[in-house]
Amino acid sequence: MEIMKDPRFNGIERFEDKIWLSTPTMHGDEQYWVDDAIHKNWITTAGENVNTVEQEAAKLIGRKYAVALSAGTAALHLAVKLCGERLYGQPRVGHGALEGKRAFCSDMTFDATVNPVAYEGGEAVLIDSEYETWNMDPAALERAFEIYPEVRLVVLVHLYGTPAKVREIRAICDAHGALLIEDAAESLGATYRGAQTGTFGDVSVISFNGNKIITGSSGGMLLTDLQADANKARKWSTQSREEAPWYQHEELGFNYRMSNIVAGVVRGQLPYIEEHIAQKKAIFERYRDGLRDLPVQMNPFDADASKPNFWLSCLLIDRDAMCPQTRGEKDALYRQTPGKSCPTEILESLLAFNAEGRPIWKPMHLQPMYRMHPFITAQGSGRARSNAYIKETGMTDVGADVFARGLCLPSDNKMTPEQQDRIIEIIHRCFK
């Protein structure tokens, strides 16, 4: 049945203008600093904006040094390279810093968190999530060190703006002599026990991608407390040019530096981070209150330990309220069932009314390119767990379960309460 003709949705009007998942929110200051760069003719990867945003971001987060780069992915790559060389020494030309080595990585995340391990010749060992924050499970990480005691690098992500159990994970890393890379791309402004995310890693990373809570249209930063690491990352990001009157290169480099134009947008955005977080929090709370009577839960966090930035509001449907749903590699099907729903039905219904939602990140161990990589749960190791396997053994693949039952809701901070009320009503009708 075509969704718009489904009698369950009678009386609901389609949005004239699309309601997006999350879009940039401009204030005018961005234009000032971009124009300033143009008027001064500093539009390359050098200039006052670049220098200023490095200083301001480091101060905001609480790190000694920040290196402005072209993307969060670039920052993650250089973070992996830095940690790899600190652990194993500088590689030969043509070899990565993790050549032949393993690293433990968050499993439920965007692939940009994991790919840099492959860039540097390493193998990602994927660590399952836990239900209390949807982030890396400390118990699974501890078990991973039992299985692979030689590993010395952990890559952790804070999913959807919710801090992971990062002090537990930091303690496990320290006990095993491992370095921690903290992917705080989605969690800028979030805190864990009073400290900003981005302060817990030996090297940390933030993103200014177009849909992040603070944006530069693109861009990211590497954060560290070691001046030598900051200097090395900055050098690598400009093709590793040596201090010589000609182009002299003694090691591999990259074209990763942030432009002064992008930095101007970031410079204009940074003063509004608390305003953006407050708007995102209000959206989360309206969803929580408006969906309270449905068999669903919002993305969880430990209110005693953390303050998320609420970048995306997400929904998890109770197991016994799921209608039948199946997903292939690129397509999904569901069967409409009275009193029940599933992510596919809700997302297709929202889209029919011109609103954008998204599935939860598909875990890396379910991705074709990482399907044969080791995958560690709190109970043991393995690969994708079928529902029958879980029922038979009691072993839960948390990431796969959250992916199957979860979805990201429209979380744009320019969405009005009235528009959000209509989205909440659409979700209610899916359970009719």
Image (cartoon, rainbow, N blue to C red):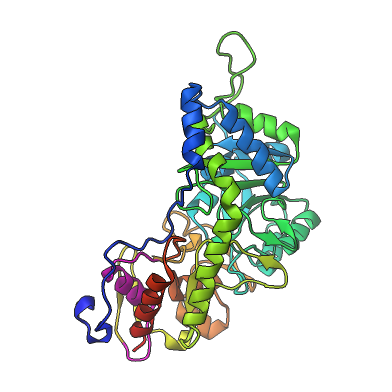
Q: Is 163 part of what is drawn in magenta?
A: no
Instruction: Check the picture and name the quadrant holding the N terminus.
Output: bottom left
Left or right of 82: which side holds 124? left
Whether residue 90 is visible: no
Q: Residue furthest bottom?
A: 338
The boundaries of the magenta stretch are 337-357
x, y percent for residue 184? 61, 53
Near-viewer residue (92 or 192): 192
Residue 104 position by quadrant: bottom right
Whether residue 55 is visible: yes
Near-viewer residue (56 or 361): 56
x, y percent for residue 321? 43, 87
x, y percent for residue 57? 65, 43
Near-viewer residue (181 or 408): 408
- Asked if 354 appears above or below 117 in the picture, the reply is below
Near-viewer residue (410 or 265): 265
Q: Residue at x 60, y 59 (%)?
A: 158
Q: Is 342 part of what is drawn in magenta?
A: yes
Instruction: Check the picture and name the quadrant holding the C terminus.
Output: bottom left
